[in-house]
Image: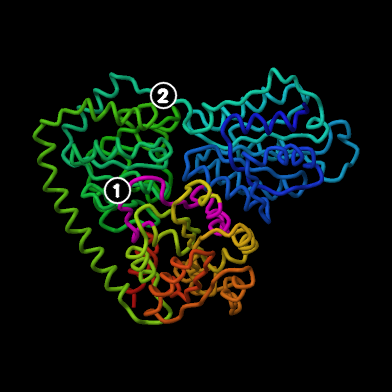
């Protein structure tokens, strides 16, 4: 067999069932191999390589399995790059397969010739080029292991056209089923470190856990919930960590930090005497630019699979290098639940519950407003009533992210939200819902996008329609790049430049792609319109004319503080 057939067969034997991408001149032999395996390996044709990578990323995030994206050389390689960077930055297990010009024609000015290894190296765990057909199986198996072991990430394998046509020894062609799910290899914590951590937790007066995306990647939500509820420890999460605990539980604070946090959640984190970071890089957003908690303030325990993360941004009394699931399981067993300080924390949880109730009462008042344009809070109140707990929600940056984070509490822990937090690229949600649909079979999928994002990825409406996917897309239409306009409003004296759009009939465009679509301008019609879309059983699009961030400040801590200062100054 040739190398193209060997690679496809190995993907099938590993357990890969979906691959996202589109063809090019250099891809023909690879597509010929895909053609012969259509009965078990579904190729999802996309309209853009970046979209294909977003789909593979979302597939990986909701399924916990390897996502696979393929793209051709030249423009295909440059277009797929942003999606690979997002997946890698968000620790999604992703395999990128790009075809390339023949090795035999290197340096002769062949159309689409490009140093793909150098292109992908900065945004992957490993980037390589298959140099001989006989080495293809070994290269692919190493790539599979690299993508899913430890902290997952993106890997890039470049496949020259002449290499794909070359022969491979059939005895060397076999898959790696153990590398299908991530993390495929788990590190157990040092027992002595666990004992010390358990003692610190038992003795703390007001400990707080901050859970990052590593908890979700590890599938450690049951273990985290059991520890936190047994020890009466409130849990805040990063945006990617949302779903690490049921957000209806008394121990849930919701998202903390600079984007999508409820103010009381940040207040609680500021009050802690023991901060326990789990599966988080303690990035600028989650820590509100490293002010929550204050460096040098509380005692810090940091658990992470990456040995260089504990202590990277905070002085750490105890760093534990381990898989989150295994560490939390051991920690739960090690804590002395009879320590009286654990019971004393229940009063603190009651106090937090009162603050939480006050926050949602205020949100409910805003959601009930009948003003126009429509407040985003009204949309999320409707979604809370209409969606079942196992709905997968994919959100763009901009308006959807902070409101989803703060005002849509997940009743069930798990991988129910997908947000591009590594680089925050617009145009994510419309393609990513396709990957989420295939990654969570049988679950409802809802996409939340902005009108800025729509212009970047509306071609994938054709993909959704062609596949007949019963996905509902809800668009927040404020006629601008709202996030940037808000920055110009708050910090640059309302000097607006290049942020506003012409009026567009987005619903008509969606109908042209085969969607059931409508625009909503009346607040009273928000919930009925979303219900009609969800009940239609077909691709559906709801364009909601939404209030601008300039007059309805999203739950972004710095913006709320700046707006409050503006009001005082008046």
Binning the other alpha carbons within 10 Å of mark 1 as few (below 14), some (14 to 19) or many (20 upward) gives many
Q: Is residue 484 above or below residue 175?
A: below
Q: How many marks?
A: 2
Label the magenta part by its dominant secondary structure: loop
The residue sitting at 41% across, 46% down in the picture is 415
| Residue that carries the numbered disc 1 in the rendered image | 246
Which quarter of the picture shows residue 499?
bottom right
Upstream in sequence: badge 2 or badge 1:
2
The residue sitting at 62% across, 33% down in the picture is 12
Q: Is mark 1 on a helix, strand or loop?
A: loop
Residue 241 percent location from the top left of the image:
39, 45
Outermost residue to the right: 108
**Foreground residue, 272 or 395?**
395
The label on residue 187 is 2
Spatial CA distance of label 2 from label 1 is: 25 Å
The label on residue 511 is none
In the image, which residues are magenta?
Answer: 405-434
Residue 395 percent location from the top left of the image:
47, 58
Please say whether residue 338 is visible from this viewpoint.
yes
């Amino acid at each position: 067999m040739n190398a193209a057939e060997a690679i496809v067969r190995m993907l099938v034997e590993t357990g890969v069932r979906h691959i996202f991408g589109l063809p090019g001149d250099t891809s023909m032999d690879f597509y010929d191999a895909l053609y012969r395996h259509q009965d078990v390996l579904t190729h999802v044709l996309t309209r853009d390589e970046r979209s294909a990578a977003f789909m593979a990323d979302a597939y990986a995030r909701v399924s916990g399995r390897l996502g696979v994206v393929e793209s051709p050389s030249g423009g295909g390689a440059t277009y797929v790059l942003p999606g690979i960077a997002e997946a890698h930055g968000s620790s999604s297990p992703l395999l990128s397969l790009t075809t390339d010009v023949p090795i035999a024609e290197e340096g002769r000015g062949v159309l689409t010739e490009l140093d793909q290894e150098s292109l992908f190296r900065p945004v992957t765990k490993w980037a390589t080029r298959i140099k001989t057909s006989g080495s293809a199986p070994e290269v692919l198996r190493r790539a599979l292991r690299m993508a899913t072991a430890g902290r997952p990430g993106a890997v890039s394998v470049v496949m020259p056209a002449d290499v794909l046509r070359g022969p491979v020894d059939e005895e060397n062609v076999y898959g790696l089923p153990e590398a299908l799910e991530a993390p495929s290899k788990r590190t157990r914590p040092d027992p002595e470190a666990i004992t010390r951590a358990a003692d610190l937790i038992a003795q703390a007066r007001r400990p707080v856990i901050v859970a990052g995306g590593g908890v979700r990647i590890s599938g450690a939500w049951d273990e985290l919930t059991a520890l936190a509820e047994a020890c009466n420890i409130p849990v805040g999460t990063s945006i990617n960590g949302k779903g690490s605990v049921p957000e209806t539980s008394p121990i849930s604070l919701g998202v903390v930090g600079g984007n999508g946090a409820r103010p009381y959640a940040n207040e609680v984190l500021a009050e802690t005497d023991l901060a326990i970071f789990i599966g988080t890089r303690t990035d600028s957003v989650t820590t509100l630019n490293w002010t929550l908690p204050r460096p040098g303030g509380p005692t810090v325990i940091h658990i992470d699979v990456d040995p260089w993360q504990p202590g990277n941004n905070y002085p750490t009394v105890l760093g534990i290098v381990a898989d989150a699931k295994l560490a939390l399981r051991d920690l739960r067993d090690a804590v002395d639940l009879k320590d009286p300080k654990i019971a004393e924390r229940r009063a603190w949880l009651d106090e937090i519950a009162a603050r939480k109730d006050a926050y949602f009462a205020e949100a409910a008042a805003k959601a009930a407003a009948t003003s126009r344009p429509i407040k985003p809070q009204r949309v999320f109140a409707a979604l809370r009533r209409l969606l079942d707990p196992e709905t997968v929600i994919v959100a763009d940056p901009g308006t959807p992210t902070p409101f989803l984070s703060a005002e849509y509490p997940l009743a069930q822990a798990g991988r129910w939200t997908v947000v591009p937090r590594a680089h925050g690229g617009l145009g994510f949600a419309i393609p990513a819902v396709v990957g989420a649909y295939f990654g969570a079979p049988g679950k409802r999928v809802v996409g939340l996008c902005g009108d800025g994002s729509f212009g970047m990825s509306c071609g994938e409406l054709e993909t959704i329609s062609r596949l007949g996917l019963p996905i509902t897309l809800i668009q927040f239409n404020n006629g601008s790049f709202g996030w940037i306009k808000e920055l110009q409003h708050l910090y640059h004296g309302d000097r607006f430049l290049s942020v506003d759009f012409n009026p567009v009939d987005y619903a008509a465009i969606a109908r042209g792609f085969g969607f059931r679509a409508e625009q909503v301008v009346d607040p009273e019609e928000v919930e009925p319109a979303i219900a009609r879309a969800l009940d239609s059983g077909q691709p559906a699009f709801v364009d909601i004319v939404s209030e601008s961030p300039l007059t309805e400040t999203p739950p972004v801590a710095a913006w709320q503080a700046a707006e409050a200062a503006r009001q005082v100054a008046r």
